[in-house]
Image (spheres, rainbow, N blue to C red):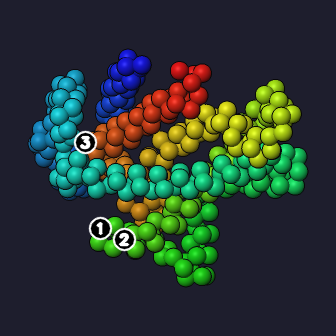
Amino acid sequence: MARFPVGKLLVMVLQVFVVATIVFSLVRLMPGDPAVLVLGTERGADPAAVAEMRHRLGLDQPVFKQFAAWIGDFVRFDWGESIFDGTKVTDYMAQRLPNTIELAVVSIALAALIGVPLGMVAAARRGGFADMLLSSIAALGISFPVYVLGTFLILLFSFKLGWLPASGFASFSDDPAKHIERLVLPAFTLALGLAAAIARMTRSSILEVLNKEFVLTLRAKGVSSAGVLIRHVFRNAVIPVVTIIGLQLGNLIGGTVLIEYLFNWPGMSTLLVKAISNRDYPLIQGCIVVMSTFFIVINMLVNMLYGLLDPRVR
C-alpha cells in the first residue's frame, strides 16, 4: 500500500514535466512576437528596439537554454513576470486560482446533489413517466449551451425578479454576503449542465447493477426497494459516478471561460485568454501548467478513491 501513492506521485511528476515541455514548445510556435506587442505599433517597427526588447525578455537565447532556465526557475516557484505589466505570475495565480477552485468546487457539489438523486429516481422508475421526464430533462441540459443558459438565468433572476446581481465579483474577506450572492448564478449555471451528465451516468450505472443476481436475492429476502437501491445497488454503481464527477471537476479548473466572461468572474480561464492574446509567454506557461497539474492531481485522487469505495479494485 505504501508504494501505491509513491508510484502515482512519480507518474504525476512525469506527466507535469511532459505537459510543461509541450506547453513551452507550443508557446514558441505561436504567431506574433511578444517584443513587438510590448513595444506597440510605433516602436515595434524599429528593429533595434525589437532586438533590445527580445534581449531583455531573454528571447534571443537558444530555445534549449530558455527551456532549461524556465524549468529550473519553475521548480523553485519562480515563474517569472508578466511581459506586459511586470506582475509576478505567482501573484496572478494567488489572485485568480482560488476564485476558479471555489467556482469549480461549488458547481460540482451542486451538480452532484442534483444529479445523483435524479439519476437514482430515474433508474428506480425505469420505463415510467418519471424516468422519461428526467431523461428528457437531462438530455436537454447536456445539449443546452452554457452561455445561453447563463443569459437566461441572468434575465430571470436579475432583471425580471431582481433576486441576484447579474454579474460582478466581491471578495469574501471584504463582504461575505455579496461574495455569495455573486457566486450563486455562475455556480448554478455550470451545475445544471453538469447535473444532467451526472444524472445520466448514475441512471445507467444503477440499471447495470440492478440486473445482478444479488439484487434478486436481496429482494427475495424481503429487503425494501429503497433499501436495495440506496444501501446495496448504489454502493456497487458509484465508481462510474465518481469518475465523471472527477473528470468534470478537472475540466472546470480551466474550462469556465464563457461563464467567467458572462458573469465577470475573475478566474484562471479569462486570465489565460488574456495572456494568449498578449503573447505573454510566462503567464501562458504558468496558467496551463497549473491547470494541467490540478487535472492530474484530481485524477490521481479519484483513482485512489476507487480502492476505498470498492476493495475489489485495489
Tell whether 107 sits left or right of 66.
right
Tell whether 237 sits left or right of 253.
right
Q: What residue is at 22 percent from the left and 52 percent from the top?
A: 91
Tell whether 120 sits left or right of 84.
right
Mark 3 closeness class: few <14, some 14–19, many ≥20 residues within 10 Å: some
Q: Nearer the viewer, residue 89 or 196?
A: 196
Tell whether 220 sits left or right of 119.
right
- Whether the residues at callouts 2 and 1 have beta carbons within 8 Å, the answer is yes
- Whether the residues at callouts 3 and 2 have beta carbons within 8 Å, the answer is no
Q: Which of pointers 3 and 2 indicates the residue nearer the eye?
A: 2
Q: Which of pointers 3 and 1 indicates the residue nearer the eye?
A: 1
Which amino acid does the dot numbered 2 rest on? Pro
Residue receiving disc 3: 282
Q: Label 2: state its secondary structure.
A: helix
- Whether the residues at callouts 3 and 1 have beta carbons within 8 Å, the answer is no
Measure how far apart labels 3 and 1 are at the Cα level: 29 Å
Residue receiving disc 2: 176
Vertical position of residue 292 compared to residue 126: above or below: above
